[in-house]
Image (cartoon, rainbow, N blue to C red):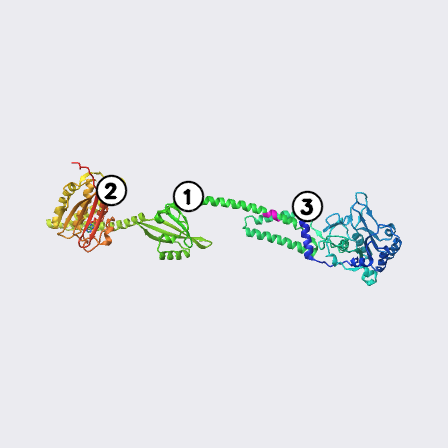
Amino acid sequence: MAGLWTPLENWSLQKRFQWRGFRPSAVPLVLVAIDDRSIARLGRLPWDRRRFAQLLDRLEGAAVVGIDVLFSEPTAQDALLARAIARQGRVVLAAARTPTSVRLEPVPPLAEVSAGIGDIGAGIFGENLQLRTALVVPKSPRSDLEVETFGTVIARLYASLAGLSQPSVPDRIWLNWPGPARSLPSVSAIDVLEGKVAPARFADQIVLVGVTATAVDALITPFDTQASGIALHWTVVDNLLGNSALAPWPGWLTGLVAVMSALGLGFLLTGRPGWLQLTITLAWAAGWVGLAVVLFWRSSIWLPLAAPAGALILAGGFSLIEGEQRTARRLEIQRERRKAQQAVTDSLATALVAATGDGRIYFQNPASAPFFPENRSTPFLGEQLQALGWLSAEQWAEAQAALGSGQPSQRQVNLGERDYRLRLVPLSQDEQVGGILCAIEDITAQLELERLRQQMLGMLSHDIRSPLTNIRGFAELLKISPPSSDIELEEMVDPILSSAERVQGLVSDFLALARIESPAFDLKVQPLSVQARLRPLMAELRPQAEARHSRLVAEDWPKEPLIIAADPLRFDQIFMNLLTNALKYGPDSQTIRVRLSLDSPWVAIAVIDEGFGIPDAALERIWEPFYRVKTAQTEGIPGTGLGLAITRKLVELHTGSIAVTSNPGQGSCFSVRFRQQNLAPDP
Ligand code: ADP
């Protein structure tokens, strides 16, 4: 697992070095560089060892001199160089190991006079060169020898000479690179040899002598892609003497942070909206990166970035999966809820239509179909609510203003024959009115009931109470002052009788209507001759008509009997009603005509009077139970207002029809039509 993150970790650490840049070193160190210029002047390497002897003589005042050049082959000038090394007295020489593990040591005459020998290559290049390096060169497979690195030997020697405490030398250190190779204070070897550099420049300095000429070494550091190996020795010396190597977090702590982060983040992220998850994650990542950078700059502490990043990805992944599951569950619940709502709205008798704020229809239930033009059952979706014409433009504007304030509004509308209650409910969305729910209820029956109730109350309070008051009044009068003559008796008893009759008439009419309207009511239909049935009825009424000097006449009666299928008693009831009305609602001395005609297959029976007539406004309403025209002329004419309601109901039960035309002041014509029957009536 850790291996997985190593490249990422190395990269992040390299970036941290680059962000930080050069770090001034506390160690007095100067490089004598065998650079391109020196080589150009003095020729290619290897140089004659006399030259190194000359160089050492110029470095007399240096605290320690480390020569990063291998002297493993004996030459004629070795004695000369050995003398110079001995003169300087504090010279560290370089050793190395070939790729085949052959050790290249300085030749013995030089090794003997040196102050120490350090390994310049093996081990250093062994592991992760950029970050970590072994300070103690591990034992080679071929020898038991353990050698310290070049930089370590120099640092130890300098510490003991300068009276510093010995640096602690761990097996491996995490290099804290001070900066790019070019920032190492240096002078050119040729300048030193030519005496152009004052000896004071080297006084008490650690002097490293090494090759920086192009293409000799190719060391990769966080700052350089092609540095001289000297840069590594510089870094080791600097880190050991300055005690400034990086302090990495222990692995277990890193693991703990990773696990805690994953758990903590997982907990924080679950159930949050996406933007918040992203913000938390980014904040966490930014915080950790910030901490890593600050610790690195301030205290050279190396905080891992890669492993926590992995934890982050894991936590993010978990919360994502969790979130997905939650969303799926929520969607499922929503689907179920929608199904239930659908079932409810589908089964409602109330028509429901929903529209957007600007009136575009996006939902309708089946009960709403009859309210769309042409009874369209196909959805009207997407069209404008206003276009349905339920409300006038003005009413819409009003309703919309009301909805704007979040209040439902209610209106009663009359569409065709029926009455409806239109309720408009604002559908809020984020506290704003996002649409309109339109509920349409058929309230025709409800209104009818209400009207009946009102009329019943009217009847009770007037038509029943006043005759009862009469009865009681006259009865009490009878009790206190008994009549002294027959005439007086009559004067007292007659009003009682007529009042009782009125109440009785009202009650029996009322019961008759109730009976007719009950589903159990049925007709005893039989073929009958209209003429034969009307004749005795008219005869029965004639004395009543004559009392008022009026006439009842038959008009246009065909000789052939007109046969219809009807219940004889109900037929009588219908015409008794129409004829008495004609008599009642007219002046004395009028002619009431009963006209018959055949308009196949219909038989029409019209009762035409010369009475008061009915005002236009009342024509529709005379069929309503308890409705009575109230004019000066009808004032005082007894009645219940139930007669025509009963009459019409009876005609309709016979599948016939009844209509009225009237000219106020001239008379009315009530015309009843029955279907003709071609059977002969029973004898
Ligand atoms: P009622 O006669 O008991 O008042 P109806 O239902 O028979 O009740 O009549 C309802 C109303 O219609 C009457 O009150 C009367 O005003 C009017 N009406 C009925 N028939 C006539 C008619 N032939 N001429 C004028 N008005 C009539």
Q: Which mark is residue 653?
A: 2
For the image shown, how many numbered marks are present on the structure? Answer: 3
Q: Position of residue 270 (x, y in %)?
A: 56, 48
Residue under label 3: 3
Amino acid residing under circle 2: Leu
Task: Tell me where the magenta segment starts and ends, as one range.
Answer: 312-316
Does any portion of residue 9 appear in the rendered image? Answer: yes
| 566, 515: nearer the viewer | 566
**Contact between labelled residues 3 and 2, with CB atoms less than 8 Å apart:** no
* Image quarter hosting the N terminus: top right
- Does the beta carbon of the residue at mark 3 sit less than 8 Å from ligand 1? no
Does any portion of residue 30 appear in the rendered image? Answer: no
* Classed neighbour count for the residue bearing mark 3: other residues with Cα under 10 Å, few (<14), some (14–19), many (≥20): few
Q: Position of residue 189 (x, y in %)?
A: 81, 59
Q: Position of residue 357 (x, y in %)?
A: 42, 54
Amino acid residing under circle 1: Ala
- Does the beta carbon of the residue at mark 1 sit less than 8 Å from ligand 1? no
* Classed neighbour count for the residue bearing mark 2: other residues with Cα under 10 Å, few (<14), some (14–19), many (≥20): some
Q: Secondary structure at mark 3?
A: helix
Q: Which mark is residue 343?
A: 1
Distance from Cα at disc 2 to Cα at disc 3: 98 Å
